[in-house]
Image (cartoon, rainbow, N blue to C red):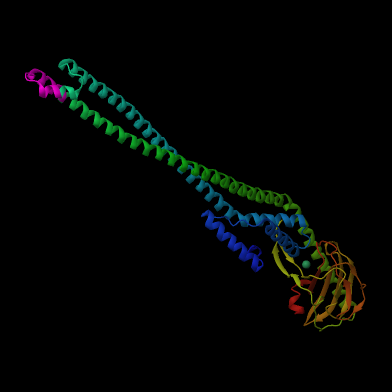
Protein backbone atom coordinates (compact mmCIF):
# COMPACT_ATOMS: atom_id res chain seq x y z
CA UNK A 1 0.00 0.00 0.00
CA UNK A 2 2.65 2.49 1.06
CA UNK A 3 5.12 1.83 -1.70
CA UNK A 4 2.28 2.25 -4.16
CA UNK A 5 1.79 5.92 -3.46
CA UNK A 6 5.46 6.79 -3.11
CA UNK A 7 6.38 4.91 -6.27
CA UNK A 8 8.93 7.05 -8.13
CA UNK A 9 7.69 8.59 -11.35
CA UNK A 10 10.07 9.19 -14.30
CA UNK A 11 12.79 11.61 -13.19
CA UNK A 12 11.97 14.34 -15.71
CA UNK A 13 8.36 14.46 -14.65
CA UNK A 14 9.34 14.63 -10.99
CA UNK A 15 11.61 17.57 -11.71
CA UNK A 16 8.93 19.35 -13.75
CA UNK A 17 6.38 18.74 -11.03
CA UNK A 18 8.80 20.02 -8.41
CA UNK A 19 9.40 23.18 -10.43
CA UNK A 20 5.67 23.74 -10.97
CA UNK A 21 5.02 23.11 -7.29
CA UNK A 22 7.73 25.59 -6.31
CA UNK A 23 6.30 28.24 -8.65
CA UNK A 24 2.77 27.63 -7.37
CA UNK A 25 3.93 27.84 -3.76
CA UNK A 26 5.76 31.09 -4.48
CA UNK A 27 2.75 32.61 -6.22
CA UNK A 28 0.10 31.50 -3.76
CA UNK A 29 2.19 31.65 -0.59
CA UNK A 30 -0.33 29.22 0.84
CA UNK A 31 -0.29 25.56 1.77
CA UNK A 32 -1.00 23.58 -1.39
CA UNK A 33 -2.65 20.20 -0.96
CA UNK A 34 -0.69 17.29 -2.36
CA UNK A 35 -3.47 16.56 -4.82
CA UNK A 36 -2.64 13.61 -6.99
CA UNK A 37 -2.87 14.15 -10.71
CA UNK A 38 -6.04 12.26 -11.81
CA UNK A 39 -4.25 10.25 -14.51
CA UNK A 40 -1.51 9.22 -12.08
CA UNK A 41 -4.07 8.45 -9.44
CA UNK A 42 -5.99 6.19 -11.82
CA UNK A 43 -2.79 4.41 -12.87
CA UNK A 44 -1.94 3.86 -9.20
CA UNK A 45 -5.41 2.47 -8.50
CA UNK A 46 -5.21 0.19 -11.59
CA UNK A 47 -1.86 -1.11 -10.44
CA UNK A 48 -3.20 -1.74 -6.96
CA UNK A 49 -6.17 -3.63 -8.46
CA UNK A 50 -3.74 -6.00 -10.21
CA UNK A 51 -1.71 -6.34 -7.05
CA UNK A 52 -4.81 -7.20 -5.01
CA UNK A 53 -5.99 -9.71 -7.59
CA UNK A 54 -2.58 -11.36 -7.61
CA UNK A 55 -2.56 -11.45 -3.83
CA UNK A 56 -6.11 -12.80 -3.54
CA UNK A 57 -6.85 -15.33 -6.26
CA UNK A 58 -10.42 -15.13 -7.44
CA UNK A 59 -11.03 -11.62 -6.11
CA UNK A 60 -13.13 -9.92 -8.81
CA UNK A 61 -11.77 -6.85 -10.53
CA UNK A 62 -14.83 -4.93 -9.39
CA UNK A 63 -14.24 -5.68 -5.72
CA UNK A 64 -10.49 -5.24 -6.02
CA UNK A 65 -11.18 -1.77 -7.45
CA UNK A 66 -13.49 -0.96 -4.55
CA UNK A 67 -10.72 -1.92 -2.12
CA UNK A 68 -8.12 0.08 -4.08
CA UNK A 69 -10.42 3.12 -4.13
CA UNK A 70 -11.04 2.84 -0.42
CA UNK A 71 -7.29 2.72 0.23
CA UNK A 72 -6.73 5.60 -2.18
CA UNK A 73 -9.36 7.75 -0.47
CA UNK A 74 -7.97 6.92 2.97
CA UNK A 75 -4.45 7.78 1.82
CA UNK A 76 -5.57 11.15 0.45
CA UNK A 77 -7.92 12.13 3.26
CA UNK A 78 -5.39 13.67 5.69
CA UNK A 79 -4.01 16.02 3.00
CA UNK A 80 -7.51 16.89 1.78
CA UNK A 81 -8.61 17.65 5.34
CA UNK A 82 -5.55 19.87 5.87
CA UNK A 83 -6.18 21.65 2.57
CA UNK A 84 -9.85 22.26 3.38
CA UNK A 85 -8.95 23.58 6.84
CA UNK A 86 -6.23 25.86 5.42
CA UNK A 87 -8.57 27.18 2.73
CA UNK A 88 -11.28 27.85 5.32
CA UNK A 89 -8.75 29.70 7.46
CA UNK A 90 -7.65 31.81 4.51
CA UNK A 91 -11.24 32.64 3.72
CA UNK A 92 -11.79 33.70 7.33
CA UNK A 93 -8.71 35.92 7.13
CA UNK A 94 -9.92 37.46 3.85
CA UNK A 95 -13.34 38.02 5.39
CA UNK A 96 -11.72 39.69 8.42
CA UNK A 97 -9.66 41.98 6.17
CA UNK A 98 -12.77 42.83 4.14
CA UNK A 99 -14.74 43.70 7.30
CA UNK A 100 -11.88 45.76 8.68
CA UNK A 101 -11.51 47.73 5.44
CA UNK A 102 -15.25 48.31 5.26
CA UNK A 103 -15.12 49.76 8.78
CA UNK A 104 -12.12 51.95 7.94
CA UNK A 105 -13.82 53.14 4.77
CA UNK A 106 -17.01 54.06 6.65
CA UNK A 107 -15.03 55.99 9.21
CA UNK A 108 -13.03 57.83 6.50
CA UNK A 109 -16.26 58.71 4.69
CA UNK A 110 -17.75 60.00 7.94
CA UNK A 111 -14.65 62.11 8.55
CA UNK A 112 -14.96 63.50 5.04
CA UNK A 113 -18.61 64.41 5.68
CA UNK A 114 -17.65 66.12 8.96
CA UNK A 115 -15.00 68.24 7.22
CA UNK A 116 -17.51 69.17 4.51
CA UNK A 117 -19.97 70.30 7.18
CA UNK A 118 -17.24 72.29 8.90
CA UNK A 119 -16.37 73.95 5.60
CA UNK A 120 -20.02 74.83 4.97
CA UNK A 121 -20.29 76.31 8.47
CA UNK A 122 -17.08 78.27 8.09
CA UNK A 123 -18.14 79.58 4.67
CA UNK A 124 -21.30 80.84 6.36
CA UNK A 125 -19.19 82.54 9.03
CA UNK A 126 -16.95 84.15 6.40
CA UNK A 127 -19.98 85.45 4.56
CA UNK A 128 -21.26 86.81 7.83
CA UNK A 129 -17.93 88.51 8.57
CA UNK A 130 -17.79 89.95 5.09
CA UNK A 131 -21.29 91.35 5.59
CA UNK A 132 -20.11 92.77 8.93
CA UNK A 133 -17.11 94.49 7.27
CA UNK A 134 -19.39 96.02 4.67
CA UNK A 135 -21.75 97.14 7.45
CA UNK A 136 -18.95 98.79 9.43
CA UNK A 137 -17.78 100.64 6.33
CA UNK A 138 -21.35 101.71 5.53
CA UNK A 139 -21.86 103.04 9.08
CA UNK A 140 -18.53 104.89 9.07
CA UNK A 141 -19.42 106.54 5.79
CA UNK A 142 -22.87 107.54 7.04
CA UNK A 143 -21.43 109.04 10.22
CA UNK A 144 -18.47 110.91 8.68
CA UNK A 145 -19.97 111.85 5.37
CA UNK A 146 -17.01 110.37 3.45
CA UNK A 147 -17.28 108.03 0.56
CA UNK A 148 -14.52 105.54 1.40
CA UNK A 149 -12.02 104.54 4.06
CA UNK A 150 -9.26 106.42 2.22
CA UNK A 151 -11.37 109.53 1.70
CA UNK A 152 -12.39 109.31 5.32
CA UNK A 153 -8.76 109.21 6.51
CA UNK A 154 -7.78 112.03 4.18
CA UNK A 155 -10.59 114.21 5.49
CA UNK A 156 -9.64 113.31 9.06
CA UNK A 157 -6.03 114.61 8.64
CA UNK A 158 -7.08 117.74 6.74
CA UNK A 159 -9.94 118.77 9.04
CA UNK A 160 -9.24 121.45 11.65
CA UNK A 161 -12.10 120.76 13.94
CA UNK A 162 -12.69 117.13 13.13
CA UNK A 163 -12.09 115.85 16.65
CA UNK A 164 -15.56 114.37 16.99
CA UNK A 165 -15.33 112.89 13.55
CA UNK A 166 -11.84 111.60 14.31
CA UNK A 167 -12.81 109.68 17.38
CA UNK A 168 -15.82 108.21 15.60
CA UNK A 169 -13.63 107.18 12.71
CA UNK A 170 -11.01 105.78 15.07
CA UNK A 171 -13.59 103.61 16.77
CA UNK A 172 -15.06 102.49 13.44
CA UNK A 173 -11.59 101.67 12.10
CA UNK A 174 -10.70 99.63 15.15
CA UNK A 175 -13.99 97.74 14.88
CA UNK A 176 -13.40 97.17 11.22
CA UNK A 177 -9.83 96.04 11.97
CA UNK A 178 -11.10 93.37 14.38
CA UNK A 179 -13.63 92.19 11.84
CA UNK A 180 -10.97 92.03 9.13
CA UNK A 181 -8.59 90.09 11.38
CA UNK A 182 -11.36 87.66 12.19
CA UNK A 183 -12.18 87.33 8.51
CA UNK A 184 -8.54 86.57 7.66
CA UNK A 185 -8.42 83.95 10.37
CA UNK A 186 -11.60 82.40 9.10
CA UNK A 187 -10.30 82.37 5.53
CA UNK A 188 -7.06 80.68 6.52
CA UNK A 189 -9.03 78.18 8.61
CA UNK A 190 -11.14 77.60 5.49
CA UNK A 191 -7.98 76.88 3.45
CA UNK A 192 -6.79 74.50 6.16
CA UNK A 193 -10.15 72.71 6.06
CA UNK A 194 -9.87 72.37 2.30
CA UNK A 195 -6.46 70.65 2.76
CA UNK A 196 -8.01 68.33 5.30
CA UNK A 197 -10.89 67.59 2.93
CA UNK A 198 -8.46 66.77 0.10
CA UNK A 199 -6.52 64.44 2.38
CA UNK A 200 -9.74 62.77 3.54
CA UNK A 201 -10.92 62.33 -0.06
CA UNK A 202 -7.54 60.78 -0.93
CA UNK A 203 -7.82 58.39 1.99
CA UNK A 204 -11.35 57.38 0.97
CA UNK A 205 -10.17 56.77 -2.58
CA UNK A 206 -7.15 54.72 -1.41
CA UNK A 207 -9.33 52.67 0.90
CA UNK A 208 -11.81 52.00 -1.91
CA UNK A 209 -8.97 50.71 -4.12
CA UNK A 210 -7.69 48.54 -1.30
CA UNK A 211 -11.22 47.26 -0.59
CA UNK A 212 -11.64 46.30 -4.25
CA UNK A 213 -8.42 44.27 -4.10
CA UNK A 214 -9.41 42.61 -0.85
CA UNK A 215 -12.80 41.75 -2.35
CA UNK A 216 -11.03 39.95 -5.22
CA UNK A 217 -8.86 38.12 -2.68
CA UNK A 218 -11.95 37.18 -0.74
CA UNK A 219 -13.70 35.84 -3.84
CA UNK A 220 -10.61 33.77 -4.75
CA UNK A 221 -10.44 32.48 -1.18
CA UNK A 222 -14.14 31.62 -1.33
CA UNK A 223 -13.79 29.56 -4.48
CA UNK A 224 -10.59 27.90 -3.20
CA UNK A 225 -12.35 26.99 0.04
CA UNK A 226 -15.35 25.68 -1.89
CA UNK A 227 -13.14 23.54 -4.14
CA UNK A 228 -11.14 22.16 -1.23
CA UNK A 229 -14.37 21.27 0.54
CA UNK A 230 -15.74 19.60 -2.60
CA UNK A 231 -12.53 17.57 -2.98
CA UNK A 232 -12.77 16.50 0.63
CA UNK A 233 -16.46 15.61 0.33
CA UNK A 234 -15.77 13.61 -2.84
CA UNK A 235 -13.05 11.65 -1.04
CA UNK A 236 -15.32 10.99 1.92
CA UNK A 237 -18.09 9.86 -0.44
CA UNK A 238 -15.60 7.59 -2.25
CA UNK A 239 -14.45 6.14 1.06
CA UNK A 240 -17.95 5.67 2.46
CA UNK A 241 -19.26 4.20 -0.80
CA UNK A 242 -16.38 1.73 -0.98
CA UNK A 243 -16.75 0.80 2.69
CA UNK A 244 -20.48 0.19 2.13
CA UNK A 245 -19.83 -2.04 -0.90
CA UNK A 246 -17.28 -3.99 1.09
CA UNK A 247 -19.75 -4.40 3.93
CA UNK A 248 -22.45 -5.52 1.49
CA UNK A 249 -20.13 -8.20 0.09
CA UNK A 250 -18.53 -9.23 3.36
CA UNK A 251 -20.86 -12.15 4.16
CA UNK A 252 -20.78 -13.66 0.67
CA UNK A 253 -16.98 -13.28 0.49
CA UNK A 254 -16.66 -15.04 3.85
CA UNK A 255 -18.93 -17.84 2.53
CA UNK A 256 -16.80 -18.14 -0.59
CA UNK A 257 -13.63 -18.35 1.49
CA UNK A 258 -15.21 -21.06 3.65
CA UNK A 259 -16.10 -23.04 0.51
CA UNK A 260 -12.52 -22.68 -0.77
CA UNK A 261 -11.18 -23.77 2.59
CA UNK A 262 -13.42 -26.87 2.50
CA UNK A 263 -12.25 -27.61 -1.01
CA UNK A 264 -8.60 -27.33 0.08
CA UNK A 265 -9.24 -29.66 3.00
CA UNK A 266 -11.14 -32.13 0.82
CA UNK A 267 -8.37 -32.19 -1.83
CA UNK A 268 -5.70 -32.60 0.86
CA UNK A 269 -7.68 -35.57 2.27
CA UNK A 270 -7.89 -37.06 -1.20
CA UNK A 271 -4.12 -36.86 -1.64
CA UNK A 272 -3.52 -38.36 1.83
CA UNK A 273 -5.89 -41.23 1.06
CA UNK A 274 -4.23 -41.83 -2.31
CA UNK A 275 -0.80 -41.95 -0.68
CA UNK A 276 -2.03 -44.40 1.97
CA UNK A 277 -3.61 -46.62 -0.69
CA UNK A 278 -0.49 -46.47 -2.86
CA UNK A 279 1.64 -47.54 0.09
CA UNK A 280 -0.80 -50.30 1.00
CA UNK A 281 -1.13 -51.46 -2.63
CA UNK A 282 2.63 -51.30 -3.15
CA UNK A 283 2.50 -48.78 -6.03
CA UNK A 284 6.13 -47.97 -6.79
CA UNK A 285 6.96 -44.28 -6.17
CA UNK A 286 10.31 -42.68 -6.93
CA UNK A 287 11.25 -41.34 -3.51
CA UNK A 288 14.23 -39.31 -2.33
CA UNK A 289 14.47 -37.04 -5.32
CA UNK A 290 14.70 -33.29 -5.38
CA UNK A 291 12.00 -30.93 -6.53
CA UNK A 292 12.53 -28.29 -9.17
CA UNK A 293 10.74 -25.10 -10.21
CA UNK A 294 7.71 -26.07 -12.40
CA UNK A 295 7.74 -22.65 -14.15
CA UNK A 296 11.41 -21.67 -14.38
CA UNK A 297 12.06 -18.11 -15.53
CA UNK A 298 8.64 -16.77 -14.56
CA UNK A 299 8.15 -14.35 -11.68
CA UNK A 300 6.54 -15.27 -8.40
CA UNK A 301 3.42 -13.10 -8.27
CA UNK A 302 2.16 -14.22 -4.89
CA UNK A 303 3.96 -16.24 -2.23
CA UNK A 304 2.67 -18.94 0.09
CA UNK A 305 1.29 -17.69 3.42
CA UNK A 306 -1.49 -16.32 5.54
CA UNK A 307 -3.22 -13.09 4.51
CA UNK A 308 -6.28 -11.13 5.45
CA UNK A 309 -8.92 -11.04 2.77
CA UNK A 310 -9.75 -7.39 1.92
CA UNK A 311 -13.49 -8.01 1.61
CA UNK A 312 -14.32 -10.66 4.22
CA UNK A 313 -11.68 -9.38 6.63
CA UNK A 314 -10.94 -13.00 7.56
CA UNK A 315 -7.55 -14.68 7.45
CA UNK A 316 -6.91 -17.25 4.77
CA UNK A 317 -3.93 -19.41 3.88
CA UNK A 318 -2.61 -19.00 0.38
CA UNK A 319 -1.75 -22.66 -0.02
CA UNK A 320 0.83 -22.35 -2.78
CA UNK A 321 3.17 -20.15 -4.77
CA UNK A 322 1.81 -18.29 -7.81
CA UNK A 323 3.92 -17.90 -10.91
CA UNK A 324 3.08 -15.28 -13.53
CA UNK A 325 3.17 -17.58 -16.53
CA UNK A 326 1.15 -16.70 -19.64
CA UNK A 327 -1.81 -18.86 -20.65
CA UNK A 328 -0.82 -21.75 -22.92
CA UNK A 329 2.81 -21.92 -21.74
CA UNK A 330 4.20 -25.25 -20.57
CA UNK A 331 4.16 -26.25 -16.92
CA UNK A 332 6.68 -28.90 -15.86
CA UNK A 333 6.58 -31.64 -13.28
CA UNK A 334 8.62 -30.61 -10.26
CA UNK A 335 9.95 -34.11 -9.84
CA UNK A 336 9.69 -37.80 -10.78
CA UNK A 337 6.35 -39.24 -9.74
CA UNK A 338 2.95 -40.71 -10.46
CA UNK A 339 -0.10 -38.62 -11.43
CA UNK A 340 -2.62 -38.87 -8.59
CA UNK A 341 -5.33 -36.99 -10.47
CA UNK A 342 -5.81 -34.78 -13.50
CA UNK A 343 -9.16 -33.11 -13.90
CA UNK A 344 -11.28 -30.15 -13.00
CA UNK A 345 -11.43 -29.25 -9.30
CA UNK A 346 -13.85 -26.36 -8.65
CA UNK A 347 -12.04 -23.19 -7.66
CA UNK A 348 -8.69 -24.74 -8.62
CA UNK A 349 -9.82 -25.09 -12.21
CA UNK A 350 -7.98 -27.72 -14.24
CA UNK A 351 -5.65 -29.37 -11.77
CA UNK A 352 -2.89 -31.97 -11.86
CA UNK A 353 -1.70 -33.72 -8.67
CA UNK A 354 1.54 -35.71 -8.67
CA UNK A 355 2.88 -37.88 -5.87
CA UNK A 356 6.67 -38.04 -5.56
CA UNK A 357 6.81 -40.68 -2.82
CA UNK A 358 8.95 -40.09 0.25
CA UNK A 359 11.52 -37.34 0.17
CA UNK A 360 13.62 -36.80 3.35
CA UNK A 361 11.18 -39.13 5.09
CA UNK A 362 8.09 -37.10 4.18
CA UNK A 363 5.32 -38.03 1.74
CA UNK A 364 5.53 -35.28 -0.88
CA UNK A 365 2.96 -34.37 -3.54
CA UNK A 366 2.76 -31.35 -5.84
CA UNK A 367 -0.28 -29.75 -7.50
CA UNK A 368 -0.57 -27.54 -10.64
CA UNK A 369 -3.72 -25.44 -10.84
CA UNK A 370 -5.83 -23.13 -13.08
CA UNK A 371 -4.44 -24.85 -16.21
CA UNK A 372 -5.89 -24.18 -19.62
CA UNK A 373 -5.39 -27.88 -20.25
CA UNK A 374 -3.92 -30.85 -18.39
CA UNK A 375 -1.67 -32.98 -20.60
CA UNK A 376 -1.25 -36.03 -18.31
CA UNK A 377 -3.70 -38.64 -17.02
CA UNK A 378 -4.25 -40.14 -13.58
CA UNK A 379 -1.94 -43.10 -12.95
CA UNK A 380 0.64 -41.95 -15.48
CA UNK A 381 4.28 -42.01 -14.47
CA UNK A 382 6.15 -38.74 -15.07
CA UNK A 383 9.74 -37.63 -14.91
CA UNK A 384 11.03 -34.35 -13.54
CA UNK A 385 10.70 -31.63 -16.24
CA UNK A 386 7.94 -33.41 -18.22
CA UNK A 387 5.19 -31.10 -19.44
CA UNK A 388 2.14 -31.81 -17.29
CA UNK A 389 -0.13 -28.93 -18.28
CA UNK A 390 -0.51 -25.70 -20.20
CA UNK A 391 -0.89 -22.71 -17.92
CA UNK A 392 -4.21 -20.89 -17.74
CA UNK A 393 -6.76 -19.10 -15.64
CA UNK A 394 -9.52 -21.67 -15.08
CA UNK A 395 -11.45 -21.90 -11.82
CA UNK A 396 -11.32 -19.12 -9.25
CA UNK A 397 -8.67 -17.05 -11.01
CA UNK A 398 -8.62 -13.62 -12.61
CA UNK A 399 -5.45 -13.81 -14.69
CA UNK A 400 -3.12 -16.36 -16.33
CA UNK A 401 -0.94 -17.93 -13.67
CA UNK A 402 0.16 -21.20 -12.13
CA UNK A 403 -0.87 -21.88 -8.56
CA UNK A 404 1.70 -24.47 -7.48
CA UNK A 405 1.35 -26.35 -4.21
CA UNK A 406 3.55 -28.72 -2.26
CA UNK A 407 1.90 -31.09 0.24
CA UNK A 408 3.96 -32.64 2.96
CA UNK A 409 2.08 -35.64 4.44
CA UNK A 410 -1.10 -34.14 2.98
CA UNK A 411 -0.54 -30.68 4.48
CA UNK A 412 0.10 -27.54 2.45
CA UNK A 413 3.64 -26.21 2.97
CA UNK A 414 5.67 -23.41 1.40
CA UNK A 415 6.79 -24.70 -2.03
CA UNK A 416 9.85 -22.43 -1.96
CA UNK A 417 11.25 -24.53 0.89
CA UNK A 418 11.34 -27.39 -1.63
CA UNK A 419 12.21 -25.90 -4.97
CA UNK A 420 14.68 -23.12 -4.24
ZN1 LIG B 1 -2.29 -19.15 -5.73
Above or below, 288 relative to 260: below
Identify whether 107 is placed above or below 139: below
Image coordinates for residue 117, horizontal then vertical, percent: 34, 28
Q: How many marks?
A: 0
In the displayed orientation, state which residue is furthest to the bottom.
288
Q: Residue at x 65, y 65 (%)?
A: 13
Residue 38: which quarter of the image? bottom right
- Point out the image quarter for the C terminus: bottom right
Magenta span covers which residues? 154-173
The quadrant of the rendering that contains the N terminus is bottom right
Which of 233/267 is in front?
A: 233
Picture quadrant where residue 255 is located: bottom right
> Is residue 298 in view?
yes
Which quadrant of the picture is home to ligand 1?
bottom right
Q: Nearer the viewer, residue 126 or 91?
A: 126
Queried whether the magenta region covers residue 168, the answer comes back as yes
Residue under the point 70% across and 56% down: 67
Q: Identify the image quadrant of residue 169.
A: top left
State the image coordinates of residue 270 (x, y, percent, origin top left). 85, 68
**Relative to 58, residue 192 above or below:** above
The image shows residue 190 at horizontal and vertical percentages of 30, 32
Image position, residue 337 (x, y; %):
87, 79
What residue is shown at x 18% (from left), y 25% (from top)?
150
Magenta: main secondary structure equals helix
- What residue is at 52 percent from the left and 57 percent from the top? 26
Looking at the image, residue 380 sits to the left or right of residue 65; the answer is: right
Left/right placement of residue 47 relative to residue 390 reads left
- Which residue is at the front of the view, 44 or 293? 44
The reply, left or right, for residue 154 in relation to residue 265 is left
Q: Any magenta on residue 258?
A: no
Residue 409 visible in this rendered orientation of the protein: no
Amino acid sequence: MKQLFSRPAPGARVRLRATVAAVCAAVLLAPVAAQANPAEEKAAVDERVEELQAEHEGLSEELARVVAELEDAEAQLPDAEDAAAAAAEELEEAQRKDDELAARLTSAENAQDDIREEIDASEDRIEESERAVVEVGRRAYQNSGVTSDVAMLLEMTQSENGLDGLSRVDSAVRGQQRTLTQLNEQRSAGLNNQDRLDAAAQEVSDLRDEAAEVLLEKKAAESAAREAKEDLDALIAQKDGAAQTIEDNQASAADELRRQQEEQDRLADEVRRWEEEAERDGIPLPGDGELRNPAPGYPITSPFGWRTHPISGTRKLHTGTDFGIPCGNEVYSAGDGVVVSAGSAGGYGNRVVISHGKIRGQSISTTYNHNTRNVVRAGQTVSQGDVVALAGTTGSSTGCHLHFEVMQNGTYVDPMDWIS
